[in-house]
Image (spheres, rainbow, N blue to C red):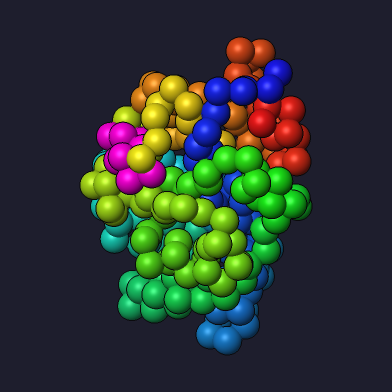
């Protein structure tokens, strides 16, 4: 059903518009080819993806620091593939990863088309938990910067999704009202429930097609947002 009261649309960035998994794998492939050619990237990625997700969950609830996130997700992944590596090498990879990640800019299918569609009807914004400098580079390098009036990141707000304060910060920055705003993201916890708890409407970008309750608005492809907006 069309949500006729909406004026401002807030997007998550990673895993919603910007294809994090594809871009991340390409980044690691480049790093390993240059410095650790004995590592099989596909094998590493199989371990890294779930480990990275768990580390991010801890980070968004302030259970680990930014630095611990960067170290732990790599250390635990190398341990999982039984690859011996020094802390100094892990630190170098962590720095190279953040440096080169924004150079790969695959977007999810339909991203530009849906942004063109929505941009004619609503004011668009981003709310992201990602690191500020890296996120701005992703947005700029993937050439979607012009679609968004504001970009809120967790470093600016001082808190991370799903904390309601980051949504309040984003609304204030956007000069938007809760009752006429909607959040679109891939995380049921951080994006959807976080937005709902903060008083916004929400749509779950469920590309993986996991089972969710019928009370949750969801889309499996970005262009399906036209059902709601």
Residue at the image point whose x is 45% and y is 76% from the top: 99
What span is colored magenta in the figure? 165-174
Image position, residue 42 (x, y; %):
68, 63
Residue at the image point whose x is 60% and y is 19% from the top: 216
Image position, residue 57 (x, y; %):
41, 40
| Residue 34 lies in quadrant | bottom right
Q: Say left or right for 90 vs 64.
A: right
The answer to whether residue 22 of the structure is visible from this angle is: yes
Looking at the figure, which quarter contains the N terminus?
A: top right
- When the figure is inspected, residue 55 is found, relative to residue 200, above or below; the finding is below
Number of numbered discs on residues: 0
Looking at the figure, which quarter contains the C terminus?
A: top right
Image position, residue 172 (x, y; %):
31, 40
Query: What secondary structure characterizes most of the magenta part?
Result: helix
- When the figure is inspected, residue 92 is found, relative to residue 132, above or below; the finding is below
> Is residue 202 part of the magenta span, yes or no?
no
Depth check, front residue: 149 or 144? 149
Depth check, front residue: 222 or 106? 222
The answer to whether residue 202 of the structure is visible from this angle is: no
Residue at the image point whose x is 61% and y is 79% from the top: 30
Give the residue at the far bottom of this rendering.
34
């Amino acid at each position: 059903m069309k949500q006729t009261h909406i004026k401002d649309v807030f997007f998550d960035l990673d895993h919603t518009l910007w294809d994090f998994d594809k871009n991340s794998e390409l980044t690691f492939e480049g790093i390993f080819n240059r410095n650790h050619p004995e590592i099989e990237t596909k094998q590493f990625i199989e371990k890294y993806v779930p480990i990275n997700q768990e580390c991010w969950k801890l980070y968004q609830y302030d259970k680990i620091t930014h630095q611990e996130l960067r170290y732990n997700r790599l250390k635990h992944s190398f341990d999982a593939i039984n690859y011996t590596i020094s802390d100094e090498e892990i630190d170098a990879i962590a720095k190279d990863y953040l440096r080169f990640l924004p150079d790969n800019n695959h977007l999810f299918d339909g991203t530009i088309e849906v942004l063109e569609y929505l941009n004619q009807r609503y004011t668009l914004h981003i709310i992201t938990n990602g690191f500020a400098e890296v996120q701005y580079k992703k947005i700029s390098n993937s050439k979607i910067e012009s679609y968004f009036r504001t970009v809120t990141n967790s470093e600016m707000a001082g808190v991370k999704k799903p904390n309601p304060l980051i949504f309040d910060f984003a609304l204030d920055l956007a000069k938007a009202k809760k009752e006429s705003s909607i959040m679109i993201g891939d995380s049921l916890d951080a994006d959807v429930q976080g937005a709902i708890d903060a008083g916004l409407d929400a749509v779950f970008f469920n590309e993986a097609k996991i089972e969710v309750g019928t009370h949750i608005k969801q889309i499996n492809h970005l262009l399906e947002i036209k059902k709601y907006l």
